[in-house]
Image (cartoon, grey):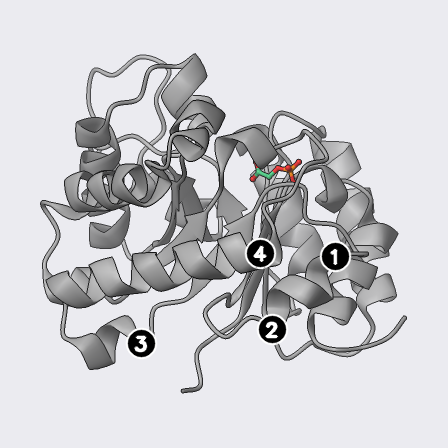
Amino acid sequence: MARKTVIAGNWKMNKTAAQASAYAAEFLTALGQAPLTEVVLCAPFTALPSLQAGLAGSDVRCGAQNVFWASAGAYTGEISAEMLVDAGCTYVIIGHSERREILGESDELVARKLKAALSAGLIPILCVGENLAQRETGQAVAVVNAQMRANLAPLDAVEIQRLVVAYEPIWAIGTGKTASVADAQEMCVAIRACLAEIVPAAAAEHIPILYGGSVKTENIAAFMRQQDIDGALVGGASLDPADFAALVRRSGGEAN
Ligand code: PGA
């Protein structure tokens, strides 16, 4: 089954506008000819306009790392999905574990954000994943299934088919520890099975499911060889343009 493959960089709270423009130029040069994968760079809000300008004319997409659920109004400090579209975003990360843990985002809030992003025409990258205690006590699949069901609750089947899902075990993020390739594949199968209970099975087959958590140039190929892993969400290893371009090329099977 041919599914879209997606490699998304998550810069987190890194890079100014000037650094984003320099990155875009260097990244496009290092990437060379357009890769077969969909490549996305998720930048801080303030760097989005210069990143978008730097990527203009290429196939590399811009994404944001967060969005608010209302389209406008008295929500001091928030950014709407329409504003992200206006800033040139195609994608938006929603429900990253750092936001769930550090900022207390609930499943219900994540669900509202998904709805808002989809309504504005953005492609959400929905992050789900268990913590170490949950993994060690054998609850990982149940936890991720519960997150999926709660987060997708307000969405209809057509909306769900437009999502990208990223499985990110919390204990593997920024720690240098990755899930074993087999564990990551097993969870991606479980996520697809969960999706198939909500949307028609044939539609679930088309939803890209990414792995995230200490993905690097050295390990991307092993994850990409798994049948149910359709790409990666990459934090630390997306910060250097030459390194991230090498990772993207490696994800498509290139040796260098
Ligand atoms: P990492 O982060 O690649 O630095 O582990 C991944 C993420 O948080 O999306």
The residue type indicated by label 4 comes to Ala
Earlier-in-chain disc, 1 versus 3: 3
Above or below for 8 versus 204: above
Q: Which residue corresponds to mark 4?
A: 232
Q: Which mark is residue 219?
A: 1
- The quadrant in which the N terminus is found is bottom left
The span from disc 3 to disc 2 (Cα, nearest Å) is 17 Å
Question: Circle 3 sits on which residue?
Answer: 205
- Which residue is pictured at 86% across the width and 75% down the height? 255
Rounded to the nearest whole Å, what is the CA distance between mark 1 and mark 3? 25 Å
Residue at x-position 18% and y-position 36%: 112
Left or right of residue 34: residue 138:
left
How many tags in the picture?
4
Q: Residue at x 26, y 71 (%)?
A: 204
Residue furthest toward the front?
137
Would you say the residues marked 1 and 2 are in contact, meaning their CB atoms lie under 8 Å apart? no
Q: Residues within 10 Å of mark 3 (few under 14, many from 20)?
A: some
Q: In the depicted view, which residue is nearer to us: 240 or 128?
A: 128
Q: Nearer the N terminus, badge 4 or badge 3?
A: 3
- Which x, y percent locates residue 166? 44, 50
Q: Earlier in the sequence, mark 1 or mark 4?
A: 1
Q: Secondary structure at mark 3?
A: loop
Amino acid type of the residue tagged 2 in the rendering: Thr
In the rendered image, which quarter contains the C terminus? bottom right
Dot 1: what SS?
loop
Find residue 35 and report its horizontal and vertical position in percent.
69, 76
Inspect the image, locate mark 1, and give the three-letter code of the amino acid beneath it: Asn
Name the image quarter holding residue 198: bottom left
Q: Residues within 10 Å of mark 2 (few under 14, many from 20)?
A: some
**Residue contact at pointers 2 and 4, CB within 8 angstroms:** no
Q: Which label number is shown at residue 166?
A: none
